[in-house]
Image: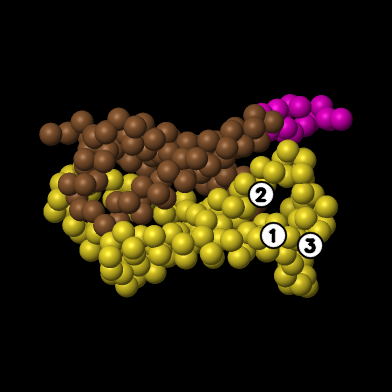
Chain colours: A yellow, B brown
């Protein structure tokens, strides 16, 4: 005897479409999205290292892509993604220790993550541009 | 409570959830200094060329940090992606395929990155 599909296929909740975006839920899903995105980005990191191991010519190809408009935009996106995942990850570790769970602290740390990730991304790019002496 | 049928089919908890949770956090804590080091290194290397990256990875401390960053990062990625897959992929067959692909991706790309790093460091 097999269990019918209809018996298992129960309605799922919550229905995402009826919920207002909140400072609790948005960083939560963004943490996952940035995590998956950074996972995809590891291909680029591996490509960079493999090219460097192959020699200056292969390395120049990767650097040319990284320096292109699309490459720069992707790098900017990955910089923000790693900043967000980093700050929100530390936020999770603090929660794991049992701190900052009340509503007010949670909302404050949520907004800190949002603004902090953008600010940190800016700082990293300013530092890199200063190192290079050019964009 | 588990029914006899559930036990026979092997359904229910695999009893390794706590370790998964814990290793996810251990790798997260390790990645805090490693990511700071990695980003600072990228900033420092952004003005350099191929020779400066090679010279950088030939020094022992950056090599160790890079290998730790790669190993910890890819392990953390595998654990995190596993949870995402288990949450969103409903079909059992698809889920199994996605979990396998996740493990193969993290092991494969991670090993390639580690070997490349070692080749840069120990190469001529």
Residue B41 on image: x %, y %: 36, 47
For label 1, the residue is A110
Q: Is residue B110 left or right of residue A26?
A: left
For label 2, the residue is A91
Q: Quadrant of the C terminus of chain B?
A: top left
Mark 1, other Cα within 10 Å: few <14 / some 14–19 / many ≥20: many
Q: Quadrant of residue B68?
A: top left
Residue A101 on image: x %, y %: 79, 49
Asked if badges 3 and 1 are on one and the same chain, I answer yes
Q: What element carries label 3?
A: loop
The tag earlier along the polypeptide, 3 or 1, is: 3
CB atoms of marks 1 and 2 within 8 Å:
yes
Q: Is residue A57 magenta?
A: no
The label on residue A14 is 3
Asked if badges 1 and 2 are on one and the same chain, I answer yes
Give the magenta range: B1-17
Q: Is mark 1 on a helix, strand or loop?
A: helix
Q: Give the Cα separation between the discs numbered 2 and 3.
A: 25 Å
The tag earlier along the polypeptide, 1 or 2, is: 2
Q: Which of B108 and A83 is in front in this view?
A: A83
**What chain does badge 2 belong to?**
A
Asked if badges 2 and 3 are on one and the same chain, I answer yes
Q: Which residue is drawn at 77% across and 44% down?
A: A99
In the rendered view, would you say A16 is above or below A87? below
């Amino acid at each position: 005897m097999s269990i019918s599909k209809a018996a298992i296929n129960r309605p799922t909740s919550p229905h995402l479409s009826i919920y207002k975006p909140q400072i609790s839920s948005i960083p939560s899903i963004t943490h996952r999205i940035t995590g998956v995105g950074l996972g995809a980005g590891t291909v680029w990191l591996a490509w960079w290292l493999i090219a460097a191991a192959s020699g200056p010519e292969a390395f120049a190809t990767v650097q040319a892509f990284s320096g292109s408009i699309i490459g720069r935009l992707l790098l900017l996106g990955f910089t923000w993604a790693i900043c967000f995942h980093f700050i929100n990850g530390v936020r999770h570790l603090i929660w794991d220790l049992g701190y900052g769970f009340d509503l007010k602290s949670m909302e404050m740390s949520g907004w800190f993550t949002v603004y902090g990730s953008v600010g940190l991304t800016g700082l990293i790019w300013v530092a890199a541009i200063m190192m290079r002496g050019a964009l | 409570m588990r029914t006899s049928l559930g036990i026979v089919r092997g359904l229910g908890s695999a009893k390794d959830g706590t370790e998964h949770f814990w290793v996810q956090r251990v790798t997260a804590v390790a990645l805090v200094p490693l990511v700071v080091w990695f980003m600072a290194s990228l900033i420092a290397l952004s003005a350099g060329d191929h020779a400066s990256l090679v010279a950088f990875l030939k020094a022992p401390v950056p090599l160790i940090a890079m290998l730790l960053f790669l190993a910890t990062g890819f392990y953390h990625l595998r654990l995190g992606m596993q949870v995402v897959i288990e949450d969103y992929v409903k079909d059992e067959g698809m889920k199994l395929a996605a979990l396998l692909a996740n493990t193969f991706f993290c092991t494969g790309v991670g090993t390639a990155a580690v070997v490349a790093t070692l080749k840069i460091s120990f190469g001529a």
